[in-house]
Amino acid sequence: MAHQRVVSSFVVAFSFFFAGKQGIVVAAPIVLLSTIGITTAVWVLTALVTAPTDRAVLHSFYAKVRPAGPGWRAVRAETGLPPSGDSLPQAFLGWTLGVMMVYGALFGTGSLLYGRIGIAVFWLAVCAVSATFLVRLLPELWRDQRAT
């Protein structure tokens, strides 16, 4: 299934590139939104028309990873394993803090390079604050991994 996604993304990107070489100008937001929409449609269609993943593979994956979330309820029941100790809200918070930290660092560094000190201080503060909260959250997120 993964190769269909890669091929669809490549075909869409190449089509817009080829159109540009032919003098057809398409605004960047249209290119981005079209690429996302078409590629997503191919992903969904591929998921719907291909055979589902073998249950043994799902059981093996669940036993190794124990992902959280209601979508794994049936697999969890089939394996007889206990639910994941992970918290989806905490994982989402950790993801959000990580994204804020990385973008804060990137935008802060870029602003410093361009001499925009005021905005650089803002973005570096976003980086520092999100990093501080992420460091405090990580032990809770990794609690189960320390026990194994």
Image: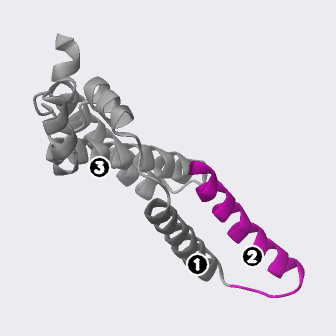
Q: Where is 31 relative to 121, above or below?
A: below
User: Which residue was labeled with disc 2?
Assistant: 16
Q: Where is 43 relative to 131, above or below?
A: below
Q: Where is residue 85 drawn, in percent x and y?
A: 12, 31
Q: Where is residue 70 drawn, in percent x and y?
A: 16, 50
Three-letter code for the amino acid on which mark 2 is drawn: Phe
Q: Residue at (55%, 68%) from the top-left corner?
A: 42
Q: Which residues are magenta?
A: 2-26
User: Which residue was labeled with disc 1?
Assistant: 34
For label 2, count other residues whose C-alpha is less than 10 Å away and answer few (under 14), some (14-19) or many (20+): some
Q: Where is residue 78 drawn, in percent x and y?
A: 18, 36
**SS for dot 3:** helix
- 3 vs 1, front mark: 1
Please tell me whether residue 14 belongs to the stretch shown in magenta: yes
The front one of 78 and 41 is 78
Q: Residue furthest right?
A: 22
Q: Residue at (39%, 45%) from the top-left corner?
A: 124
Between the C-alphas of marks 3 and 2, the distance is: 32 Å
The front one of 115 and 34 is 34
Way the structure is coloured = one colour
